Image: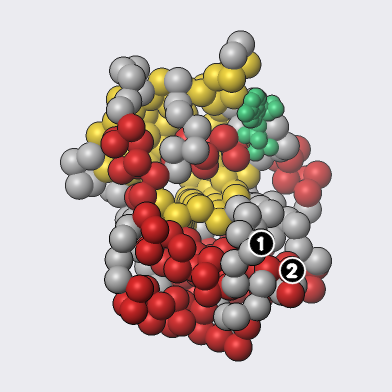
Amino acid sequence: MLLSIKRLAKSFDDLEVLKDINMDIEKGTVVTIMGPSGSGKTTLLRCLNALEEPTNGVFSFDDGFTLDFQHKINKNDLLTLRRKSGMVFQSYNLFPHKTAIENVTEGPIIVQRRSKEEVYEQANNLLKKVGLEDKKDLYPHQLSGGQQQRVGIARALAIEPDLLLFDEPTSALDPELVGDVLSVIKDLANEGWTIVIVTHEVQFAQQVSDQVIFMDGGYIVEQGPPEKVLQNPSENRTQQFLQRIL
Ligand code: ADP
């Protein structure tokens, strides 16, 4: 088990957004999170990446690193948590004044303080992997949405995280660009990356997920293999949601 999450809760002031979330993420598997808008999916990913601090709960990693949010967490531990995962955002979040390759090298050079030479070599390889070797010196505004998102994926890979997090990575894209990005993510899944992805792409979820989690109102309503949750859901709320989006 790469990461075990117990009793995760998150509130914004009086609003309880995540309630008693329990989930296990096995190394080398793909966990897909689905559910209606406002159900807490993005907040869950942001808690995993320490962009939000949980109100309660325990994260236990397979290397022995454990965080109990019942107690105040120190900055170093939050940084350790942040560096365990690479996040790919719905709206790409690239630095607009940096080229594609500079976006990829920024984290490893500035945050991880690795050598420029090694980092640039790796970034070239990563941009090749996502099919952008000829675009590496272009700025985000010179790239299509699909290309920007592939830079975002290369950037997340560059920090060599244990866990890749994708927050609706294709929902801002024109329909004809969705396939390229999904196929990069499929390749990563086949290479054995551990992936948590929020998506409404049911067919994709069916093909790549080991585990599907259906959320509603801050709770996990149902979780299990895609054959179960997507094809034969036992909960009404899951059935209704799937009927709406299919
Ligand atoms: P989803 O990703 O499933 O659409 P979100 O995690 O984005 O859901 O949001 C869940 C709920 O939390 C929503 O009601 C949203 O308004 C609220 N929320 C998210 N972020 C914040 C924030 N920073 N401050 C206050 N409320 C927030």
- Label 1: few (<14), some (14–19) or many (≥20) C-alpha neighbours in 10 Å: few
Residue 77 visible in the picture:
yes
Residue 67 sits above or below residue 153 on the image:
above
- Residue type beneath disc 1: Pro
Residue identified by numbered label 1: 96
Residue 96: x and y in percent read 66, 61
Which image quarter has ligand 1? top right
- Residue type beneath disc 2: His
Q: Secondary structure at mark 2?
A: helix
Q: Secondary structure at mark 1?
A: loop
* Sequence-wise first label, 1 or 2: 1
Which residue occupies 80% across, 67% down? Answer: 175
Residue 44 sits above or below residue 111 on the image:
above
Residue 186: x and y in percent read 53, 70
Residue 194 visible in the picture:
no
Which residue occupies 23% across, 46% down? Answer: 62
Q: How is the image coloured?
A: secondary structure
The image quarter containing residue 204 is: bottom right
Identify the disc placed on residue 198: none
Residue identified by numbered label 2: 141
Residue 118: x and y in percent read 32, 77
Most extreme residue toward the bottom is 134
Do labels 1 and 2 touch, CB within 8 Å? Answer: yes
23 relative position to 187: left or right: left
Residue 56: x and y in percent read 41, 20
- Of residues 24 and 164, which is closer to you in this image? 164
Which residue occupies 79% across, 73% down? Answer: 176
